[in-house]
Image (cartoon, grey):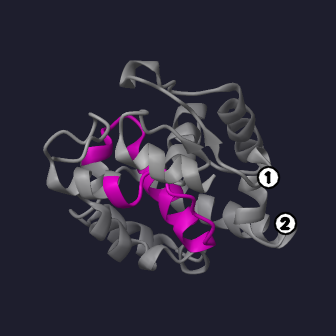
């Protein structure tokens, strides 16, 4: 009997693999949290599928998602990124990624880790939702509004509430797999 999963991955093998292995699993490694900040901010106005299929391009363009290296990007590196067909070549988003890396490092200094900062908004535990269909899943919540507002105050760009909520979903701060999905049972049991 095939596994039941959320409907959103459809039949795209990469989307299915991402859904089955990553989406909603709690992430505490700062570098991975930064990776998802880069990818989610790149997604603004686009589909997740578009970004996921360029993930390797983003990894190459942005120094393996090393926030220290990205924070040091100067005009030459920004120009290189803007010429790279492996990523979305949007000048504002590329520049925002560099600025976001700088803001990320300031948070690490202030809180000891980005993980401690961001997971502090959920008191260190995933929020487990119990949606029965995709249409019930919100695009943003009061919590993502608050986190977005705080991140923007700290210098982040392309971090509106919808992007922040997508980041929370991706990194397991909220578990939004529908209840019929095999991953809901796995991840809710870990929370």
Q: Secondary structure at mark 2?
A: helix
Q: In the rendering, at what x and y percent does residue 109 appear?
A: 82, 72
Magenta stretch: residue 24 in it?
A: yes
User: Label 2, on which residue?
Assistant: 111
Above/below status of 68 relative to 94: below
Q: Which residue is mark 1?
A: 120
User: In the rendered view, does 28 fall on the left or right side of 162?
Assistant: right
Residue 165's label in the rendered image is none
What residue is shown at x 73% (from left), y 54% (from top)?
119
Percent coordinates x, y for residue 75 in the rendering = 47, 70
Which secondary structure, mark 1? Answer: helix
Q: Which one is in front, 177 or 145?
A: 177
Q: Which residues are magenta?
A: 20-49
> Picture coordinates of residue 106 (x, y %)?
77, 66
User: Residue 7 or 104: which is nearer the viewer?
Assistant: 7
Q: Residue furthest right?
A: 110
Q: Is residue 29 magenta?
A: yes
């Amino acid at each position: 009997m095939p596994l039941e999963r959320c409907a959103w991955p459809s039949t795209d093998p990469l989307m299915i693999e991402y859904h089955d292995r990553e989406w909603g699993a709690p992430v505490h490694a700062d570098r991975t949290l930064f990776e998802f900040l880069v990818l989610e901010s790149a997604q603004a106005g686009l589909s997740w599928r578009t970004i996921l299929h360029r993930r390797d391009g983003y990894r190459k363009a942005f120094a393996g998602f090393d926030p220290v290296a990205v924070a040091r990007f100067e005009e030459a590196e920004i120009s290189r990124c803007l010429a790279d067909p492996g990523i979305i070549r949007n000048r504002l988003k590329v520049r925002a990624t560099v600025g976001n890396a700088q803001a990320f490092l300031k948070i690490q200094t202030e809180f000891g880790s980005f993980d401690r900062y961001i997971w502090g908004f959920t008191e260190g535990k995933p929020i487990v939702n119990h949606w029965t269909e995709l249409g019930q899943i919100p695009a943003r919540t009061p919590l993502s509004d608050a986190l977005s507002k705080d991140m923007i105050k700290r210098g982040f760009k392309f971090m509106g509430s919808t992007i922040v909520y997508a980041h929370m979903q991706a990194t397991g701060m909220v578990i939004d797999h529908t209840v019929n999905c095999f991953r809901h049972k796995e991840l809710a049991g870990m929370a």
